[in-house]
Image (cartoon, grey):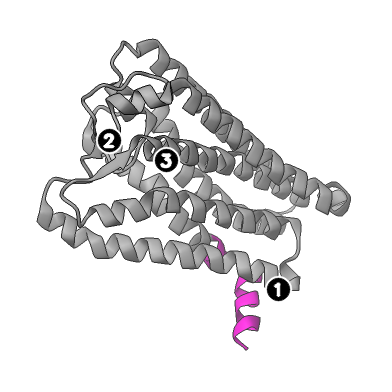
Amino acid sequence: MEEANQSVVSEFIFRGLCDSRELQKFLLLPFSALYLMTVLGNLFVVLLIIADSHLHSPMYFLLANLSFVDFCLSSVTTPKLTTDFLKDNKTISFGGCMSQILCVHFFGGGEMVLLVTMAYDRYVAICKPLHYSSIMDRQKCIWLVLTSWIIGFVHATSQLAMILYLPFCGPRIVDSFFCDIPLVIKLACLDTHTLRLLINADSAVLATTCFILLLISYTYILVTVCLRSKDGASKALSTCTSHITVVVLFFVPCIFTYLWPPSITWVDKFLAVFYTVITPLLNPAIYTLRNKEIKNAIKRLIH
């Protein structure tokens, strides 16, 4: 069936971020710089946590995994986006398009669950400090990370399975810079209204469930600490602020895209750039700038 699809539509054409050739050439440098900083920033965090024994704790193990996922998520879309700035004909093969869809939802879904895991880690550390080492042992951390990868994989394969065998017989222009399901499914040669609802519901349920769990977790943490002491509340707020910032920056565009798919093209593209290009860059910066142990590890590395 996939071969039949490819015999009808063997490739898709991206419209890109804009139509102006001059603007595309102008955007090449900043987006290349953003991707380079994303790669260097996230890999630096991963290597720093591996190299510094002071950071061999559950929180930083999870943070290293988050940075690795962000590096992968950005690498699925940004290199293609930057090279397409130099091309008049921005094409991608049918297989390449399906691979982008699979990887974006795999890493994106995995990151959502990983952020919930990080919130659970902070909950145990702040609300049950005496039992932290027994609850968040090494084996538990590994299983939590594996669970995030498994859920991401199941989510991605379920999304791909719903569109892989659709008949694509033209038009083949995707009004974006990567293959996102809401845009690709519009190109199918049959009525996909029900299927669009199922796909959006799949992504929306995962994103909304994780977001609600995160809000409940951090609210419970802050309320619990506030009842204990003002000093503890200040410290907990400082610890959780970076996590909450990352959560909001990552989830809001995703939930907006799938719960309320925008009909305005530039809004759709802005949201896509935000959660595939900007957020993976901001995550290491936010954690690094707000975390004393990371900053101390950097000082030890320099000296």
Label 1 vs 3, first from the N-terminus: 1
Q: CA distance from mark 2 to mark 1?
A: 45 Å
Residue identified by numbered label 1:
52
User: Which amino acid, by three-letter code, is at mark 1?
Assistant: Asp
Q: What type of secondary structure mainly makes up the magenta span? A: helix
Q: Secondary structure at mark 3?
A: helix
User: Which amino acid, by three-letter code, is at mark 3?
Assistant: Gln
Residue identified by numbered label 3:
100
- Which circle marks residue 12 in the picture? 2
Q: Vertically, is 219 above or below 42?
A: above
Q: Position of residue 219 (x, y in %)?
A: 63, 39
Does residue 54 appear left or right of residue 119 in this picture?
Answer: right
Does residue 181 appear left or right of residue 145 in this picture?
Answer: left
Mark closer to the observer (3, 2): 2
Q: Position of residue 91 (x, y in %)?
A: 26, 43
Q: Is residue 291 visible?
A: no
Which residue appears at 22% of the width and 24% of the height? Answer: 170
Label 3 vs 2, first from the N-terminus: 2
Q: Which residues are magenta?
A: 287-303
Label 2 vs 1, first from the N-terminus: 2
Q: Vertically, is 81 above or below 186?
A: below
The number of callouts visible is 3
Q: Is residue 184 magenta?
A: no
Label 1 near label 2: C-beta < 8 Å? no
Between residue 136 and residue 67, name the one nearer to us.
Answer: 67
Q: Position of residue 42 (x, y in %)?
A: 52, 62
Does residue 30 appear left or right of residue 75 in this picture?
Answer: left
Label 3 near label 1: C-beta < 8 Å? no
